[in-house]
């Protein structure tokens, strides 16, 4: 059975099984075939950033973008955390952590391209993010950059973590966590 027939059969089955919510699920199945770069941009720019910075529900944003529920354990989460997934070959996740933060995880892909797209999305936000610090951590395995912005409630931070100069084979292509805090962070330059 060809790929298009399988997709058509799955689409029909979903429509019959759940007529009210079938289109979001079909879109989710369609989104399983997109590349990691596109999926990573969606998870960061359309889910995690607006969820944290505009106090919008992560699950609603993820589902609106065609992301399907996933096991939070697959990205290191616990029972109180929730995750949604895009893509199969280059899986991408949006993770709602119990502490109120949101992480975009891109398992595979061109790390430098992912970093550049994520940085553009963060810097384009109206909150006025600025680069705070960039460090190499975990014995050279990871490079982490922190972007900071003042908000009405305090401070918003967005981290970008990519493989460093000495990555190991299981190092993720990109991880970006967005969170709020009430006080300035020492990771931000000049209190930004």
Image: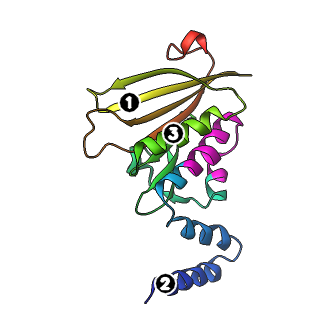
Residue at x-position 52% and y-position 49%? 40
Instruction: Read off the residue under disc 1.
Output: 143
The one nearer the camera, 104 or 99, is 104
From the image, give the main secondary structure of the stretch colored magenta.
helix
**Image quadrant in which the C terminus is located:** top right
- Residue 60 % position (x, y): 67, 52
Check contact, mark 2 vs mark 3: CB within 8 A.
no
The Cα–Cα distance between marks 1 and 3, rounded to whole angstroms, is 13 Å
The Cα–Cα distance between marks 1 and 2, rounded to whole angstroms, is 41 Å
Counting residues from the start of the chain, the first of labels 1 and 2 encountered is 2
Indicate yes or no whether the magenta region holds residue 57.
yes
Residue 96 relative to residue 127: left or right = left
Indicate yes or no whether the magenta region holds residue 143.
no
Hey, which residue is sitting farthest top in the picture? Answer: 190
- Which of the two discs, 1 and 3, sits closer to the camera? 3
Residue 168 relative to residue 160: left or right = left
The one nearer the camera, 27 or 80, is 27
Q: Is residue 91 above or below residue 144?
A: below
Asked if residue 119 can be seen in this view, the reply is yes
Residue neighbourhood size for the residue with mark 1, other residues' Cα within 10 Å, grouped as few (<14), some (14–19), many (≥20): some
Residue at x-position 63% and y-position 18%? 182
Hey, which residue is sitting farthest bottom in the picture? Answer: 1
- For the record, the magenta segment spans 41-61
Residue 182 relative to residue 186: left or right = right
Counting residues from the start of the chain, the first of labels 2 and 3 encountered is 2
Instruction: Read off the residue under disc 3.
Output: 116
- Residue 123 % position (x, y): 62, 32
Q: Is residue 57 above or below residue 179?
A: below
- Which of the two discs, 1 and 2, sits closer to the camera? 1
Instruction: Read off the residue under disc 2.
Output: 6
Counting residues from the start of the chain, the first of labels 1 and 3 encountered is 3
Secondary-structure class at tag 3: helix
């Amino acid at each position: 059975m060809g790929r298009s027939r399988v997709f058509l059969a799955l689409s029909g089955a979903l429509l019959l099984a759940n007529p009210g919510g079938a289109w979001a699920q079909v879109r989710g199945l369609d989104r399983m075939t997109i590349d990691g770069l596109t999926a990573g941009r969606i998870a960061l720019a359309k889910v995690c950033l607006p969820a944290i910075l505009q106090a919008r529900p992560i699950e609603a944003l993820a589902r609106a973008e065609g992301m399907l529920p996933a096991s939070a354990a697959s990205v290191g989460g616990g029972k109180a955390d929730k995750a949604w997934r895009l893509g199969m070959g280059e899986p991408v996740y949006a993770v709602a952590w119990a502490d109120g933060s949101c992480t975009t995880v891109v398992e595979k892909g061109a790390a430098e391209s992912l970093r550049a797209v994520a940085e553009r999305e963060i810097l384009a936000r109206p909150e006025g993010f600025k680069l705070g610090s960039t460090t190499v951590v975990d014995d050279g395995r990871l490079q982490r950059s922190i972007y900071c912005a003042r908000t009405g409630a305090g401070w918003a931070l967005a981290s970008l973590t990519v493989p460093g100069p000495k990555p190991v084979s299981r190092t993720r292509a990109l991880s970006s966590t967005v969170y709020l805090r009430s006080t300035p962070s020492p990771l931000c330059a000049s209190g930004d």
